[in-house]
Image (spheres, rainbow, N blue to C red):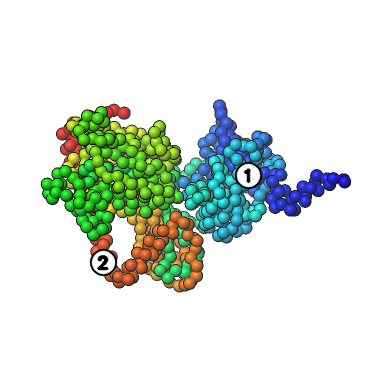
Amino acid sequence: MRRPPVALLLLLLAALVPGAARAEKPAVARSLIRIPGETRGAGIVFFLPASDDVGAVAVSAAHSFEPELLEQAGEVEFRLARTGERVSLSNRYFSEPGRPFHDPGATLRDDYVIFALDVKPAEMRVLEPAPEAPRLGARVEVLGIPSDGTRDQVAVFGTVAGVSHTRLEVDLDSPADLRGWGGAPVLEGDKVVGMLQAAWPSADTLRVGASPIEGVVAALASPLDGGRGRPFTARSPPGDRPWIAATGRTPTSPPSAQPASDPPERAAGPTRLRMEIEQPPDDSIVGNRAGVFVAGRALALQGEFKRFDVVLVLDTSQSTSTPTGVDVDGDGVIGAPPLGPLGALFGGSTDPGDSILAAEVAAAQRLLRGLDPRNTRVAIVVFAGEPAAARRGFMIGSGSTIAPALTIEPLTSDFERVDHALVRVRERGPRGMTHMAAGVDQATVELLGLQGSLSETDRSSEKIVLFFTDGAPTLPYQGFDADNIRAVLRAAQRARRAGIRIHSFAIGPEALIGPVAPVEMANITDGKFTPVRHPGGLVSVIEGVSFANIDEVRVRNLTLDQEAHDVRSHADGSFDALVPLETGKNRIEVTAVASDGAEATDTVTVNYAPGSADPYLPEELVMKRNELLEARLVELRRGRLEAERVKAEETRRELALEIERERAEAAARADDQRKELDLELDPE
């Protein structure tokens, strides 16, 4: 029998197997930047049609390309992964490049760069942008390059889980190795709907964040120099670049043009505010009678912002067994010293759930509930320690030694694991002395991923330590107070050189008698010291903590001229609120106030149609919305009066004033203690 020609077989295969024909020509390529002495790989690029002489441009993520390197090299090559064959070359931007999404004020939609090509890409498939955004539940594929380079192109598949004008979210069918996939195209059918930017764990798979392709399409409509492009070596100064590209929103506080310094130095200059309303999508339809759930993030930083890595350092020394005087665990019983006033000298509580350690754990759990796992990782470190004699086994009654500091949970965005770790800390209970320096050093080890750490470091994250203690350092030099304090300050210096900021909390009157160690560890690292004279109030104090430098977030329905029912701002700058609505169009305004008084405002429009379905809400925000709805329901059932709201606000203000008074007094006592002990830091 005569065999059919190969060409006919290929045509039949293309007709029977969707996507088989297009697999002959890859749609993605690797980027290579050659500078003197080395060749650097950058992100994945794909190709879209353009109206220039070549008829196509290369598109990728802005965060994958350093403008300084492009300027130094003068050109970038695009090559196939398996064979290394060059498919095109560029030495200029087609349009004004966007900005990395982790820049202050930027979103995923802003993160793009478009290259003008010298020659049309050879043997490559030029993709087409989709005319509109995908629907929730739509099936998509991401085209990328395997890390081993054995194939020119592979695809992973997933389902659209979130759509807004600034981002797409896709749940992959199964976890995949996405290293080096920044800039990879996301396709629905044969059209590009987005560009891959980031990924994070979600349930038993990965959720990826992508920039909608509309941002790139808008930039293509504004080519530089009539479509000829601008050479890398003639890039515009930062002050001439747009504040936000193709988002349709203009924040009130544009960023400073000064670049941030790398850690450990901190950038100087005016505060830059980043404001993003993530939920609800602009011009969306909502139907919940309780109001619309509003969520987003506000950040005020001097320098570049990327993500937060936070280590909670808890004092578990024996003194933290002391009762707080309040019902921390809510069991209806208030713990007291087991032997009355005399027992207070030896520590312990008739209800361990009301101890200072229990208050530390409760405060950490309260803080955790407000953080956003998509942008923040958290680790748990505890410190206590034994004197040298006990470690050598010479102390009577010592059944085992205590490591001066331990990592109970490494950095993770799985906050359920962190919460379980905190429960283990409470159940483990207090013991030992107070080795503060070890706690600071252990946190530094975890944040930097040094030898002995359990965490993987993120070089680009903002690194924060929240340090809780109820006393003064008694180790590593038992009986030598000044040397113990110097050890703490040296550890703080090491943290500062690593770009770590420490916010310290001195809990209880004993900690405020000689507060120089927690005061100075915060001063050295440009953090904040917070006195907590009444240990039972620690949970309330922690609600005012912000390492995003945001003092207040206000949310208002401008159409109704009414404030939100409840607004909660959290330590990492995330915020959420429940806003009342009237039927029809409602304009919602969010204003963030930075610690230095700077403000940024953003607005979003929603349409209230009673009984209609609410917009899609990411899994990470569902719990926050439900907490607000439950709180609102309780208010309505109790018929809470406006006077009670005012009283609660007055109580918060009084607490803030008390903290400021205590902070000033503690600073004065720390200064006296420094002089008394003749403390001088070692020269760096």
Tag 1: amino acid = Val
The residue lying furthest to the top in this view is 37
Answer with left or right where residue 591 lies relative to residue 404: right
How much space separates mark 1 and mark 2, taking CA atoms?
A: 60 Å
Q: Which residue is mark 1?
A: 154
Tag 2: amino acid = Glu
Question: How packed is label 1: few (under 14 Cα within 10 Å), some, or many (20 or more)?
Answer: some
Q: Nearer the viewer, residue 462 or 613?
A: 613
Q: Position of residue 414 (x, y in %)?
A: 42, 48
Answer with left or right where residue 20 lies relative to residue 437: right
Q: Quadrant of residue 36?
A: top right
Precedes in sequence: disc 1 or disc 2: 1
Q: Which residue appears at 69% of the width and 46% of the height?
A: 23
Q: Which residue is mark 2?
A: 644
Asked if 667 appears above or below 173 in the picture, the reply is above
Asked if 43 appears above or below 296 in the picture, the reply is above
Q: Position of residue 637 (x, y in %)?
A: 32, 71
Asked if 493 appears above or below 225 in the picture, the reply is above
Determine whether the residue tagged by mark 2 lies in a helix, strand or loop.
helix
Q: Nearer the viewer, residue 429 or 159?
A: 429
Asked if 42 appears above or below 37 in the picture, the reply is below
